[in-house]
Image: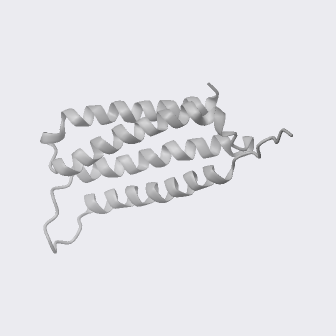
Amino acid sequence: MDAVSRAVCIGGFAMFVFGLAIGFILKVLPNPRAALSAHLNAVQSGTFLIVLALLWPKLSVWPRVAATLGNAIWIAFWAVEVGMVIASFAPPAQEGAPAGPIRLSAAAFQLSGAVAMFIAVTALLFTFAPAAHVG
């Protein structure tokens, strides 16, 4: 396993274990529904990152961008997760009430993570090395 695969795998495994831990404290957080979302996201995203790490050597990503792209992907997934965890510490929103600082910071993490994730995963699709043709 090369350094990029290892970094993505460790990021995914840590997220998976973190998601399991969130599952134990769902009921004690101020917003249990948001905590459940954070738990499910961490378990599913962690699993995806582990699978991506196992597939990384077979993807034939351009060597010059592989490290940057691999690290950007797991960091973006973690940014979304951090935003979801922050949201679980805010009480449920009342209809028509303005967003408080906790909700705004959660939204900022989620938005920045989602944009970075979209860009990184899209870049992953376009940075494959050309396949060798036998013929």
Which percent across, then down, holds residue 120?
A: 57, 52
Choose between 49 and 88: the one closer to the eye: 49
Give the residue displayed 16% in from the left and 47% down from the top: 32
Residue found farthest to the top:
1
Relative to 87, is 17 above or below?
above
Which percent across, then down, holds residue 38?
A: 29, 46
Give the residue displayed 17% in from the left and 51% down from the top: 31
Quadrant of image for the C terminus: top right
Which percent across, then down, holds residue 13?
A: 43, 30
Give the residue displayed 69% in from the left and 50% down from the top: 127
Choose between 13 and 54: the one closer to the eye: 54
Residue 20 placement, left or right of 114: left
Which percent across, then down, holds residue 118?
A: 51, 57
How many numbered marks, from 0 up?
Answer: 0
Give the residue displayed 50% in from the left and 34% down from the top: 51
Residue 21 placement, left or right of 76: left
Residue 89 placement, left or right of 14: left
Quadrant of image for the N terminus: top right
Residue found farthest to the right:
135
* Residue 103 appearing in the image: yes
**Color scheme of the displayed model:** one colour
Residue found farthest to the front:
135
* Residue 7 appearing in the image: no
Residue 133 placement, left or right of 122: right
